Image (cartoon, rainbow, N blue to C red):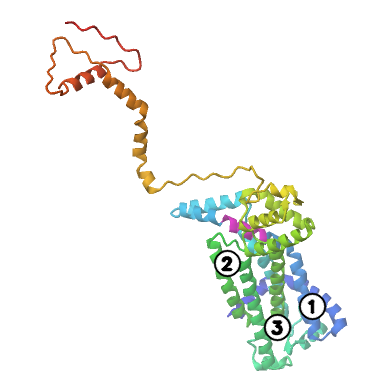
Amino acid sequence: MISDIVNAVSGVFAFLTTPVSWVIVQFHTVYGAIFGPDTGWAWGLSIVSLVVLIRICLIPLFVKQIKSTRNMQLLQPQMKAIQERYKNDKQRQSEEMMKLYKETGTNPLSSCLPILVQSPFFFALYHVLASIAEGNTIGVINQSLLDSAQKAHIFGAPLAAKFTDSAAEVQAMGASLTDVRVVTAVMIVLMSASQFYTQRQLMTKNVDLTVKTPFMQQQKMLMYVFPLIFLFMGINFPVGVLVYWLTTNVWTMGQQMYVISRNPTPGSKAQAKMLEALQKHVVDHSATRNKRERNIVKAIVAKGRDRNEYERKFINGLSKAGLAAQADGTVAKGAAAEELDEDGMPKGTPKRQQPKRQSKSQRQSGGSTAQGKDDSPSSEKTSLEKQDEPQDAKPGSKTKQSGGAKPAGGSQQRSKAKSGQRKGGPQRPKSPSKK
């Protein structure tokens, strides 16, 4: 069933069989002069060279894929917030997502572009090799080239043989079933293993480990899904197609290793390793040696206090060695290094002040503290002065004192005196008491 699907898809891209076959024939002419036209080396290396040519043409798309993948990693917290905010409104959620992609210039499909662009050539090559296995000429491959390709064996397996071929079909190509199945099985395992390692390398070394996002879970799932897909589909691929796909996997793995070592994702283990090596080189030479190192130092200095843990460690390491990173990417010796604080910033740079968090007891006693502020000495003094003021008895009133006790109406008189006073202005003079 899988073979029928692949054949149907290959028919869609049949228009590419002529250019693909032409490229293979041109390389075969070169390698045939070295190894012999009917050898597996000549035809196998022609397929490998086809892969290399296609992948070189796809380098701009690969760079775009790397940038898109990093942008997607940085946008994951914002995307998660949008999903939580509009979880009951899918249409609004999609609109906000598209708005976020547009504002940041991110295209989610960019990470799949190299595979999508390469797939038509893959199916065209499959169509060419299937025609060779059936003994049919195709594209620019004439009868003489067809006979030469049918004679070519890679480690004893014909170029057009598959793992699922019967003993009769393999014998018709001049090979044994055991050789075909051993060679195809080894190639399928290597193809799946290289795909797994490439994805695992991306997850373990080139991902910002400080941010846990659904994107990381998706990449982790793909790390196991893709090798299984290659494992089940590989048994239906001819040996030539397995050579093609194994070569492109190895190319992807090497290309990714180069990118990770030269331009890792900020906050990843790869960045920590790169900055550690860069710090050692800069300290040993007391200078940045080339434009790449200057660009790295310049980018770290420009971040200021937004640097991650590894970048701060790099700046502090230079400072301990008596060096200071400059804004232009160079490093300075001596006094310049003494002007840096513990975060690698120039001394005197204002730090971000975080409000002190009050304890539970402080928050609970906040009301009583505010109330206690009102009980100031000045207020106490004023109240005492008012109490000491002589109170004039009303005409006709008599006070009875017994045993030094306070007059019963004293408090009432004071309250009446207070209520009769004007607020915020000069007080009315008291009238003289009449006897």
Q: Amino acid at mark 3?
A: Val
Residue located 66% across and 64% down the image: 270
Q: What is the distance, in whole Å, between disc 3 and disc 2 at their CAs?
A: 29 Å
Q: What is the distance, in whole Å, between disc 2 and disc 1 at their CAs?
A: 33 Å
> Is 29 covered by the magenta stretch?
no
Residue located 69% across and 62% down the image: 276
Q: Name the residue carrying label 2.
A: 219
Q: How many marks?
A: 3
Res. 419 image quadrant: top left
Residue located 67% across and 48% down the image: 340
Q: Main secondary structure of the magenta part?
A: helix
Q: What is the distance, in whole Å, between disc 3 and disc 1 at their CAs?
A: 13 Å
**What is the crowding at mark 2: few (fewer than 14 residues within 10 Å), some, or many (at least 20)?**
some
Q: Name the residue carrying label 1.
A: 46
Q: Quadrant of the N terminus?
A: bottom right
Q: What x and y, as percent, mark residue 88?
A: 43, 54
Q: Which mark is residue 322?
A: none
Q: Is residue 21 visible?
A: no
Q: Name the residue carrying label 3.
A: 239
The relative height of residue 271 versus residue 252 in the rendered view (above or below) is above
The relative height of residue 294 versus residue 12 in the rendered view (above or below) is above
Which of the two discs, 2 and 1, labels the residue nearer the N terminus? 1
Residue located 64% across and 57% down the image: 313
Q: Amino acid at mark 1?
A: Ser
User: What stretch of residues is rendered in magenta?
Assistant: 66-75
The relative height of residue 195 versus residue 332 in the rendered view (above or below) is below
Query: Viewed as shown, does residue 326 lie left or right of 192?
Result: right
Which mark lies nearer to you, 3 or 2?
A: 2
Please name whichever residue, 342 or 24, is drawn nearer the observer in this view of the structure. 342
